[in-house]
Amino acid sequence: MALLRRPELLFRHLANYAELFRSELSAMGSSLATRAAGAVVAILALLLALGLSGIAVMLGFLQGSWHWVLVAVPGAAWVLGLVGLLLALRSTVKEKVDDVKDELEADVRALRLIKEANDD
């Protein structure tokens, strides 16, 4: 009944949902861009690490001794590759969808409570 008397409440509520979806979509887009950048960094860094590791092994055997730089330089590339891989594999889309679902479920519960109160 309140909906019939004050339809602007329904329109305001729907406008708020539209704003929520819009903000979640923009956040999802930035999240996907971060994941894509992480994947590119991971691929490039892991290729670089593989090449530097091969060069370090060859230089180590050629010189007959292992200098700390032969471990540190490829190690830094491996660490950078792992950081990029973690960024690429991070899942944030499911969290955003769960937030919207929780909001909808809360509204459905509130509407049920209002209906039950009106029926009594």
Image: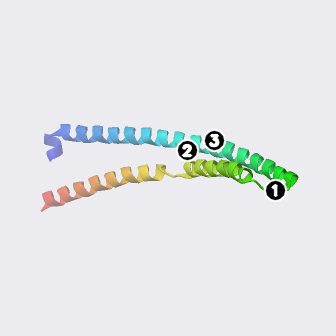
Name the side, left or right, on which 64 lies relative to 77. right
Res 6 → quadrant: top left
Q: Earlier in the sequence, mark 1 or mark 2?
A: 2
Amino acid at the residue labelled 3: Val
Q: Closer to us: mark 1 or mark 2?
A: 1
| Number of numbered discs on residues | 3
Residue at x 23% of width, y 58% of height: 112
Name the side, left or right, on which 21 lies relative to 14. right
> Looking at the picture, how far across and down is residue 104, in whole percent?
32, 51
In the picture shown, does residue 99 fall above or below 31? below
Q: Residues within 10 Å of mark 1 (few under 14, many from 20)?
A: few
Q: Earlier in the sequence, mark 2 or mark 3?
A: 2
In the picture shown, does residue 67 fall above or below 29? below
Amino acid at the residue labelled 2: Arg
Kindly report the distance in space between the C-alpha atoms of the residues bearing marks 1 and 3: 34 Å
> Looking at the picture, how far across and down is residue 99, in whole percent?
37, 52
Q: Closer to us: mark 1 or mark 3?
A: 1
Name the side, left or right, on which 35 lies relative to 66. left
**Numbered disc 3: secondary structure:** helix
> Looking at the picture, how far across and down is residue 74, in whole percent?
71, 50
Amino acid at the residue labelled 1: Ser
Kindly report the distance in space between the C-alpha atoms of the residues bearing marks 2 and 3: 9 Å
Residue reaching furthest to the bottom: 120
Residue tagged 3:
40
Q: Residues within 10 Å of mark 2 (few under 14, many from 20)?
A: many
Q: Earlier in the sequence, mark 1 or mark 3?
A: 3
Res 12 → quadrant: top left
Q: Residue 35, which numbered label?
A: 2
Front in this rendered view, residue 37 or 4: 37
Residue tagged 1:
65
Residue at x 46% of width, y 42% of height: 28
Kindly report the distance in space between the C-alpha atoms of the residues bearing marks 1 and 2: 40 Å
